[in-house]
Structures are given as C-alpha cells and as structure tokens.
Amino acid sequence: MLKPLFRALFANRLFLAGGGIVVLFALLALAAPALSHAHILREPFKQDQKALDTEGMPLGPERGYWLGTDNLGRDVLARVVHGARVSLTVGTAAMVMATVIGVAVGVLAGFYGGKLDLGLMRFTEMMMTIPPILLAIALASLMDGKIIHLHPASVHWHFLDVELRRGMVSLFLVIGFVCWPGMVRVIRAQVLALKEREYVQAARVLGASNLRLIFRHIMPNLLPIVIVTAAMSTANTILLEAGLGYLGIGVPPPAPSWGAMISDGQAYFTLSPHMVIVPGVAICLTVLAFNLLGQGLQDVLDVQQKR
Amino acid sequence: MNLLEVKNLKVHFPVKHGLFSRVKAHVKAVDEVSFTVQPGETLGLVGESGCGKTTLGRAIVKLVEPTAGSILFEGEDIAHLNGSELRLRRRNFQMIFQDPYGSLNPRMTIEQVIGEAIDIHRLAENAEARHKRIVELLQAVGLDAVHAQRYPHEFSGGQRQRIGIARALAVQPKLIVCDEPVSALDVSVQAQIINLLQDLQQQRGIAYLFIAHDLAVVEHISRRVMVMYLGKVVELAEARAIISAPKHPYTQALISAVPVVDPDSKRKRIVLPGDVPSPIAPPAGCPFHPRCPMAQLPRCQAEVPALREVTPGHWAACHFAK
C-alpha cells in the first residue's frame, strides 16, 4: 500500500526540492559539532581578533572565511550552520506540539460537536485574535529565571520545580502554544466531513464505541491532512523562532540563532551586508523548503479531494 | 411477535438561523410513522427523493435520534437508548448502505473491515476462529478467502456491496435496513445483489426493510410495500396488491410512471402538477392535497387523513380510498 505512495512522492518535483533542502539542512545541523571538531568548520563561539580587518570591521568572504565574519570576529558560516540546529530543533518541536494540541482540539470539537465544539472553537478563535508574535513576546518575557514550585511548601520535592528559563525548551513551548489554533480549524473541518462518511456510520451501526471510531476510522483518514498541515506549519514555527531571535527573546546569546544574527548584523549592513544576507537567505531557504515540501505532499496525498 | 414495531415515530430536524443559532423551524423528515416488520419478511419502502425514507431507515438503526415515538425491537423500546446499552443491542439490526464506494474505510483491508464487527461483539474466541468466520462470511456473499487481504479500492462496486453485506452479516442480525443498496450499481449487478439478499434471507431468516425508489425492484423483493410522501406513510399493503390496485392517488401516480414492457399498453400516465412542498411547512390537512387529482377542497385541506385499513391488509391514508 505504501510503495506507490513513495514512487509518487519521488516523482513530485516540489516534494523533491523541498525535501532535498530540508534533508541537507538537517544533515548539516546534525553534523555541525562533528564538523567543528574535525576543523572542517570553525567554532561558532570563537571570537578572533585576526578575523577582523585593520579598522576592526567584519571581514567579507576572504581569508578562508567563506561567508565572512561578524562584528566579533566569529565565522558566519559556522554560526549559520550551528544556528540551523536551533532553528530546526525549535521549529520541529514546536510543530509537533502545535500538531498534537491542534489535532486533539480539532478532533474533540469536530467529533463530539454541541457544547464542547462551541466552547473549544470560541476559545480557539479567542487565541487566534491575539497576534502570535505578540503572545510569544509576552510569554517569552515571562521566562525570567523565576522558579515555580509545583509541590506543597512543606515537602522538598524539588524535582517538581519548574524554572522559567530562556532556552530551546521554553522557546519551543511558547511557539508551539501560539501556533496550534491555526491547525484546529483545518482538522475540525476534516473531522466534520469524515464523520459523515458511510464507513464511519457503518462502524457506528456495528456498535463501535466513540474511541474506536476516532482511533480506527477518523484518525487514519486524517493522517494525510495532518502531515500536510504539519509540514506547512513548520515554516511558520521556524519563522516565528527567527522573529523572536531577532527581537532578542530567542535562545540567549552567544548561542547562534538566525534571527539574532540578523539583528546583530543590522548595524553593519551598509559595510558588511553579508552579516544580514547569510542568515536571511538561510531563513528564506528553510521556510521555502518546508512550504514546497508541504505543497508536494498535498499534491501527492491528494488532500483536497480524497475519497 | 413483531420483530420491529414502530409507533408514531417522528424525526424533526431543527432549522437554525441567525445569531446564537436560534431554531427557526423544523424539517419534518419523518412524521407520525407507524408500521411493523415480522421476522424474516421484507418490507419495501418507496417514495421519491426527500420523502424521508432514508431518514426513517437511519432512525431505526439509531443513526439519527428520533424526536418522538417508539421503536420496539422484539418488544423493547430502543428509540431513546444510548451509550453502551444501545451498542450491545446494535448486533440485532444492521444497515447496508447506498454508496458502495463510501461505505468501506479505504485504509482497512477486507479482513479488518469484517473483523471489526466480530471484535466489537467478541464473536470469536481466538484469531483462528476469527479468520475462519471471515472466510465463511466472504464465501456466503460470493467472494473468496483470497480477497481478505485486499483493500476496498481493488474491488468493483458490486463486490464492495457484497463486502458491505458480509460486514452486516458478521454480527448475525435479525433485521437489516437496506438503504437503496442497488441504486448505485449496474442493472446486471443489481439483479445479482438482489438475488444474494434473497438467498441470505432464506438461509438465515433475516428481515429486511428495503428502501428504494425503483418500484420494480421493491415489488420483486418485498412481501409488503410501504409508500411514503412528505414524511408520512400514505399506503401500506401486500406488494402485489399495491402494484395491481393502488388505493392512494399518490401511489397510483407512482405506479403509472413505471415503464411497461408491452408497447400496446393502454395505461394512462398520471402526471402530478407542481413540486413536492417543503417538509418545513407541509400543507395543512392531507399533505398531498395540493397535487391530488381527486382532492375535494374543504375536507382535504382541513382534515388529516388517517392511515386506515381500506380492505383487509391494505392500508391507505386517503379520505376517499375504497
């Protein structure tokens, strides 16, 4: 059953282009520490006086720095490759979180309908009226190192302490939390259509429980649209991560993040535009790749007009 | 004892409109319908599109919630049962659907489709018995054991309808509601499926509520036939009686529209004026009176005709039927 699917996928140019770039970036990101260790890539944190010109300005693409250096004399290529680790990890984790919440809410609302649907959808719509970047800023600014004790004060169960700390974990939680409402509508609409299908009705007549209907009949037929929306929403989560990085509330420095690199490079834009262009192109390519991937999957999985 | 006794069944759908989804009106899809089905018999149900016949069938298998009335299955009212109470009893009444392409989950093999019925009601002790049962069912509907591992898209429309029948049979039901089971199939395949349904009825004593809009098909398979118009039963009688001597003017018009093979036939076609009125606001009195060739005005507009036994075993809802 899967073989023709793979054949169709590999015949689809959009999927190949998008998937190719994603795989390339993912491999680079995975290999980045090893590459740095093997001195194929420089260290992303190493500040080098010699990597600045005589006036203390960043170098362009010269002296073995393929993509130039930044204002602190760090190799831009190394930083961009290491930055891919942050972007892809945070983007993917946030996508998974948004998908899980989005699917759960969408399926509950669509399948059960009635008051539950009303409540969940109004809440979702309320979430949607808040601009995601604004909500993300508000949430991210809460991550100020405060420790929340989830255990009663009388006992010392410190494993229950939650430290509100800036980092990849809090970042993907924040992004995942602001991205799920977009998925809910798509999923709910599909569930509404699926539950009226005759095979779902047939299973109901046979005496299938609601859980069986959801997990055996609705979910498997929801998979194509979930895959497509997930691929497309990864473009969003990565863009949001870059946005938060640019605003200075992403992963804390000196960790390399594409958004933060752009904001660092802004002041040097007229003399050393590569500081902005390189991470900018990286963001563009990644977002484009995930969109192409989603588009290709959509074509192949025939999401719109599935029987 | 009656296998199924439906009493004053109503299925009304609210028409919601405007802010806060206020209920504006009701579509009276099924209105005050009563009838019985005996064990092992076939009751045909005909009527044009939108007359409520499908809704009635779906209400009986509890796919839609009845608004009022009772559905006595072997004497027990299932009209307002819910949850696991209802799920246990679902074994007894199954449904065969109209669209053979939409009624099988595209992601399940035939073994999984039929096996699901067995799993839900725990009808097999072990995997071996389960498989044996599935093969038996496939053979009973004229398919083969090798088909078990295939997916629905590998089958033709007629074969899929056979799979749908096997799935319904898997739980050994006493009643099967057949919702236009052959209208989506080629004529040659229609006959095969009808014959299969008749054979299965003889072997297993299953009762059918056979919904169709094709009078010829219904006459062939049914012992008794029920005619619906605008959510109400207008005539109920033996199949032969209803075809040869219909009592209700609506049935007379329906029958006159059936093509006859004899080119010299002198039968006159009764053409009804106008369209079917909206079931949201059905006409007062007899719902058929605006289109009826023999309506007599003050009475038909004022008085709802009751379904009465005109001749023994022949019921019609018309003031003037005799």
Image (cartoon, grey):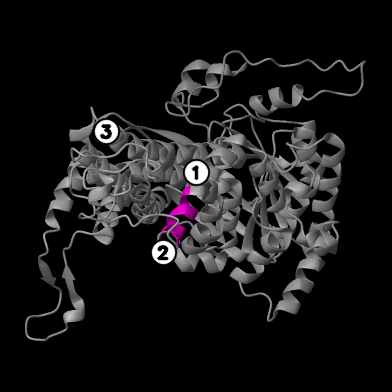
- Chain letter for the residue marked with disc 3 in the picture: A
Of the numbered discs 3 and 2, the one sitting upstream in the chain is: 2
Judging from the image, mark 1 belongs to the subunit labelled A
Q: Is residue B84 magenta?
A: no
Residue closer to the observer: B126 or A242: A242
Mark 1 crowdedness (10 Å alpha carbons): few <14, some 14-19, many ≥20: many
Determine the main secondary structure of the stretch shown in magenta. helix
Mark 2 is on which residue type?
His
* Whole-number angstrom distance, CA of label 1 to CA of label 3: 39 Å
Mark 3 is on which residue type? Answer: Ser
Tell if the residue under mark 1 belongs to the same chain as the one under mark 3.
yes
**Picture quarter with the C terminus of chain A:** top right
Q: In this rendering, which labeled residue sits more in front, label 1 or label 2?
A: 2
Q: Which residues are magenta?
A: A25-35
The residue sitting at 31% across, 52% down in the picture is A176
Say which residue label 3 marks: A272
Q: Residue at x 33, y 50 (%)?
A: A79
Are tags 1 and 2 found on a single chain?
A: yes
Q: Position of residue A149 (x, y in %)?
A: 12, 74
Amino acid at dot 1: Val
Residue farthest to the front?
A: A54
Which of the two discs, 1 and 2, labels the residue nearer the N terminus? Answer: 2
x, y percentage for residue B308?
A: 59, 39
Q: Position of residue B38 (x, y in %)?
A: 68, 57
Task: Find residue A228 and name its label.
Answer: 1
Mark pair 3, 2: CA separation = 28 Å
Estimate the spatial distance between the alpha carbons at disc 1 and disc 2, rounded to whole Å.
37 Å
Task: Name the residue beneath numbered marker 2.
Answer: A37
